Image: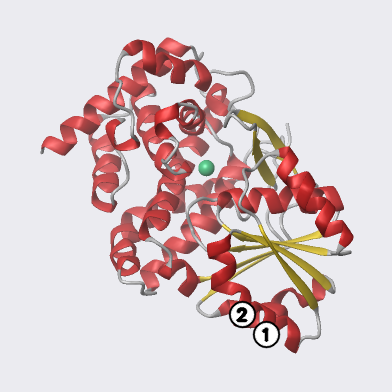
Amino acid sequence: MHKIMIAPGRYIQGPGLIKEMATHVGRLGSRFFLIGGPTAIALVQEPVEASFDHASKDCRFEIFTGECTRSSSEALSEKAKNYHADVIVGVGGGRTIDTAKAVSHALEAALVILPTVASNDAPCSALAVQYKENHMLDRFLILRRNPDVVLVDSQVIAEAPTRYFVAGMGDALATWFEAHTCTKSNAKNLPGGTTTSAALRLARLCYENLMAYGLSAKLAVDRDSVTPAVEMVIETNILLSGLGFESSGLAAAHGIHEGLGAMEETHSALHGELVAFGTLAQLVMENHPKDEIDKVMGFCNSVGLPVTLGQLGISNLSRENLLKAAEVACMEGLTTHNSYFDINPHRILGAIIGANALGEESLKA
Ligand SMILES: [Zn+2]
């Protein structure tokens, strides 16, 4: 198998970037179709329009409130086609970004991602996850190439609710452990190759940055402020975790996230919050030493990431109820199977219960 590493064409990060957006993306085309939720659009529309006006480029905003399903992206593709868009811009969080990716893929248009929250590592990747109307996983859509430009305005990110920023740290927390597991099992990364030493170092740097700067960054974001630690963690959540997961591979943390996410009770939990708990469960399943798990759990508790099922909204802790999540986590095609041992629902169930027990214990301390 070959080593493969993929990445976005360009990554740009700094405070106030939206005001100069056209300078950074103008070369990609002349008609920009921007897709975003109402909150994200309200935040960026004025400065972005002024910037495109100044550059004599056309742009149109389309509000998207739907789910990340095939039908919602098909409806938007139709609108973008009628507008003769040559560049699609996803403005907002995970769902919007994945939808914009699917639209750009359908139109074979250029793709810009403008995240307004750093809640997950989707912006840089060539992967879009689509769900069915009932919230079950539909498919992993792999784009022809990664986004052309990922533009991150750190001031916008810092002013968004802290919960999103913290959830992004939860997603980035998994990156190193999943990358490491994939190395041990020789699992394929997203482009279908094996990891490079570069991608593995980036995944490791994710973990190191979170431990070094995570709490300081969270406290600054609580006060809507950009500090060097905030810049570091934005880069960690979006760039390092994005490159790390995509080019090194995902494993049980994300598979368990799918299992827990399919439960009715967790529908208000964010991707990164579920992944953080999934990481703890993966560490328990792989039998990492207690002091290592304590370090990860201590970090979660310090920044406010969930360490128990209760914190994710799950009150029915019976084995029967949790077994349903474990079964979903073992579905064919999920990255749970990138583990270096055989996976079955009972093994996952034990990991979920074991992680929850350690989490509950840590909250007593
Ligand atoms: Zn993720």
Q: What sort of colour scheme is used for the picture?
A: secondary structure
Ligand 1 within 8 angstroms of badge 1 C-beta = no
| Amino acid type at image mark 2 | Glu
Going by the image, does 85 lie left or right of 139? Answer: right
Which disc number belongs to residue 46?
2
**Who is closer to the viewer here, 195 or 349?**
349
**Number of numbered markers:** 2
Q: Position of residue 215 (x, y in %)?
A: 29, 59
**Who is closer to the viewer here, 263 or 225?**
263
The N terminus sits in image quarter: top right
Q: Position of residue 233 (x, y in %)?
A: 42, 61
Tag 1–tag 2 contact (CB < 8 Å) = yes
Please name the residue that numbered disc 1 is placed on.
Answer: 50
Occupied quadrant, residue 162: bottom left
Q: Position of residue 302 (x, y in %)?
A: 24, 51
| Amino acid type at image mark 1 | Ala
**Who is closer to the viewer here, 349 or 6?**
349
The C terminus sits in image quarter: top left
Using the image, determine if residue 206 lies above or below residue 34.
above
Going by the image, does 207 lie left or right of 156? Answer: left
**Element class at badge 2:** helix
Residue located at (55% from left, 58% from top): 239
